[in-house]
Amino acid sequence: MTCDQVKEHIADYLAGALGPAEAEELNEHFAHCAACKQEAETLAATWEALGLLEQEQPSEALRPRFYESLEAYRQGLQAAKPEPVRHRFFDWRLRGFQLGWSAALLIVGLIVGQWLGDRRHGRTDLARLQDEVQHMRQLVTLSLLQQQSASERLRGVDYAYRVQESDTQVLTALLHAVSHDPNVNVRLAAVDALHRFADSPAVRGSLQQSLVKQDSPLVQIALIDFMVDTHDTGAVSALSSLERSSMVNKNVKEKAVWGLSQLQ
């Protein structure tokens, strides 16, 4: 293998995803190429350092609305259009995920390397390091939210809790997920994640528009709970529209009436 070919397989090598023959070929290359060996060792150390980042846990509070919304969810499933089957080659999807993580690991490696270099020269800048870590978290979050797999997009929503509330790109991605993600669970998780941004007029306005356009009763109920929890009086118009509509799910209409009683 050439050095360029080896670099393309380092992420697979570290993840143990290569076959015995390919792994042995990389080992032989590392034995004769100090530069590639050093890069593999650096990425391995970075991968380990990534696991040391603070792991924030989601709230332990259970959604009280789950059981009252179960019937709405069942009715929504009957009315919802089936999600089209996407034919994807497994190896292509795996490759895309591995390339995304390889990029993230490379970024972390550059951050850690720069920080260690500054420390050796007595110019450690903790604030800059924190900014770079936040930037890395943003990239990982946005990358996961764009994955084809719903489970990976859910991980992206969970990772969004680790970015700063002022991060407009992550905020935009979460709003897009609420309105357009084909998976109901991803939409619900995004609604919960947006509680951190509830003071933003842009967030409130976007969710009000999403409420009347949603095709999932369960997501509509979650949005109504969001608006009541955040005392969003600007949502009265959207709730009134749901109350008057003859096309709205019965449980959603009842929830809209309740929401109006709480906000008016």
Image (cartoon, rainbow, N blue to C red):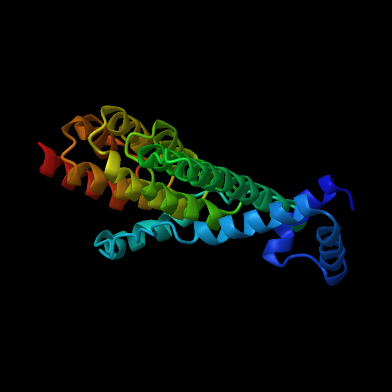
Mark count:
0
Q: Is residue 236 above or below residue 220?
A: above
- Left or right of residue 20, residue 215 in this image: left
Q: Which image quarter holds the C terminus?
A: top left
Locate residue 236: give its quadrant. top left
Q: Residue 87 location, x and y as percent? A: 73, 51
Residue drawn where x is 12% and y is 39% of the image: 263
Task: Confirm whether residue 87 shows in the render.
Answer: no
- Left or right of residue 62, residue 16 in this image: right
Q: Residue 30 location, x and y as percent? A: 81, 59
User: Please, which residue is most extreme toward the bottom here?
Assistant: 20
Q: Residue 18 location, x and y as percent? A: 78, 65
- Left or right of residue 242, residue 215 in this image: right
Residue drawn where x is 42% and y is 60% of the image: 74
Q: Is residue 113 above or below residue 74?
A: above
Locate residue 227: give its quadrant. top left
- Left or right of residue 143, residue 232 in this image: left
Locate residue 226: give its quadrant. top left
Residue drawn where x is 47% and y is 56% of the image: 77
**Camera-nearest residue between 28 and 122:** 122
Task: Confirm whether residue 134 shows in the render.
Answer: yes
